Amino acid sequence: MRLEIKDLRVHYGKIEAIKGVSVVVNEGEIVTLIGANGAGKTTILKTISGLRPVSSGSISFDGQDLNKIQAHERVDLGISQVPEGRGIFAGMTVLENLEMGKFNRKDRKNEMDEDLDRIYTLFPRLKERTSQAGGTLSGGEQQMLAMGRALMARPKVLLLDEPSMGLAPQMIANIFRIITEINKQGVTILLVEQNAQQALQRAHRAYILETGNVTKEAKASDLLNDPAVREAYLGTGAH
Amino acid sequence: MNFSVVTTQFWSLVLQGLALGLIYSLVALGYTMVYGVLRLINFANSEIFMLGTFAVLWVEIELLGHPVAAKPLGGFELVYTLVIALVGSMIACAVLAVIVELVAYRRLRARGASRLASLISAIGVSIFLMETMRMFTESRPRTAPRLLEKWSFGEIAGANFRIDTMLAIVAPIIIFVILDQFVNRSRLGKAIRAVSLSEENAKLMGININRVISLTFLIGGLTTGAAAFLYTTVYENTVFNVGFNMGIAAFTAAVLGGIGNIRGAFYGGLALGMMEQFASAVLGSQWKAVTVFVVLVLILLFKPNGLFGEAVQQTRT
Ligand SMILES: Nc1ncnc2c1ncn2[C@@H]1O[C@H](COP(=O)(O)OP(=O)(O)OP(=O)(O)O)[C@@H](O)[C@H]1O
Ligand SMILES: [Mg+2]
């Protein structure tokens, strides 16, 4: 697995939101993309998933150019996304939401059960709520459901868009612990976050994104100790 | 005005209202299914209905060789004639609906055109279909052969349980039950719900949006085709602009129940059919069409989301 973004440019109308970004994610890594509001993080993930068209540059996955591949086919290739705001199907039950996650995988009943088992082990709370409507779950539970649903597709790489958004500290710690766990099970992760502290602690490498440009790329642990980064993103810089 | 009919013919009016209303419901599904996933009023649906009624005539007269003056059929021949006419109309309408989507909407959608552009395209397709049929039929109304003798099961409380009326009531109910199960339980049905909830998130699940959209046009075409068969069987005639009034009524039914909402289409059609029958009994049949427009205007003014809310299958919360 190797996800490679080269000189990517993406527009909304005439406005250029991504201005020549290059990012690489290697097999087994947790890579985090950190940036302020409006930096373009969500846009990059949407473009990887095929929800936004590329203006110029390229995205390749395992050496294959994704440009001609439609959004729904990218899921089959092994790219799954947990979108910003979670994107739970509100009127569907927890189980139905999970089933949607493996929409194109026509496998046998026992494989479905295996996947469900694995997901319920990661997120025991979901198991207690299989028949509850997705829209009535708490924010944290919805985040778990969205992650579980994405894992149902057995992705090679999981794109996570601000999984900690709107969650209480304890739930944030829990979610990040599970991200590491998923990674250890062999899923490569591209993590978009504003919660730089947690993200940098969990990730192997990091990119800093400012208004559509990558301004820094380094090992995550180095950025944790970088004074400029601490000042801008961790709120604990030396004054 | 004649209020006494409300009491003297109450059950008879109810039966007539049910039959008419459920035919509306089936056509309303054509609007509602498509709106649910595309947020687009498929104005061509009324003309798909119109072509369906001609498809029924064609199957009965040309394909199966029963001229307009033919005697009613019986037994097995009656059953298979009706079934072939029904299936023929459903298939014709479904194929046409899918083609209309490919030709008139998909290309616009792919280029990110505005809803208004699609709406105009829809109206264009409508006019094209209607005018083409006007030329072919030289604007003359056509009569359907009476293949189904209109015998009655009997009379209860002044209501005549005639076979064609009963058919127009029972068949739509069966269709709605099947569709309801399909949308709620099947894999493809769930895909329809997912797309109607969020196109983007559906894509992230690996759902092929274009296929789901074609599927909704197909389903809408099937139900509209069934309506065309029932309409032709009950009213026994058609004309190139039969879709106009039907379209307005069915659209009103869809909006009344909450457009995009499948059960809403069912109840919206029922309610409208009843109102129409009772209003025309009390005020005179010239008020029939007026009733539909009054309901449409009132609902748009006071309850634009309809009685059941805008949602495919109560999924949107
Ligand atoms: N649908 C859209 N139409 C027009 N502009 C958009 C649209 N979506 C995003 N943008 C613009 O693109 C830029 C990047 O937005 P994006 O959502 O990718 O930022 P982000 O880094 O995810 O921010 P946040 O942390 O707030 O989620 C912003 O300037 C935003 O206003
Ligand atoms: Mg974002």
Image (tube, helix red, strand yellow):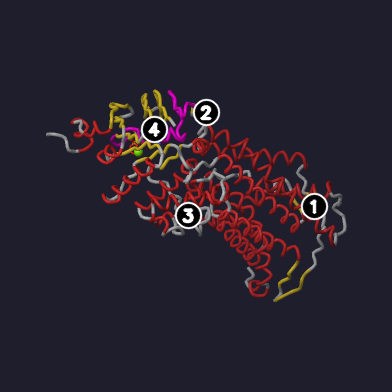
3D distance between C-alphas at marks 3 and 1: 53 Å
Residue at figure coordinates x 53%, y 42% from the top left: B207
3D distance between C-alphas at marks 4 and 1: 61 Å
Badge 3 element: helix
Q: Earlier in the sequence, mark 4 or mark 2?
A: 4
Where residue B240 sits: x, y (%)?
72, 45
Nearer the camera: disc 3 or disc 4 = 3
Q: How many marks?
A: 4
The part of the image, by quadrant, that contains residue A106 is: top right
The image's mark for residue B143 is 1
The image's mark for residue A95 is 3
Q: Hey, which residue is sitting farthest bottom in the picture?
A: B157
In the rendered view, would you say B175 is above or below B109?
below
Q: Are marks 4 and 2 on the same chain?
A: yes
The 10 Å Cα crowd at callout 1, few under 14, some 14 to 19, many 20 or more, is some
Name the kind of residue labelled 2 in the image. Lys
3D distance between C-alphas at marks 1 and 2: 53 Å
Q: Nearer the viewer, residue A93 or B179?
A: A93
* Residue A47 within the segment the image draws in magenta: yes
Instruction: Give the residues in magenta.
Output: A35-64
Name the kind of residue labelled 4 in the image. Ile
Mark 4 lies within 8 Å of ligand 1 (Cβ measured): yes
The image's mark for residue A68 is 2
3D distance between C-alphas at marks 3 and 2: 33 Å
Name the kind of residue labelled 1 in the image. Thr
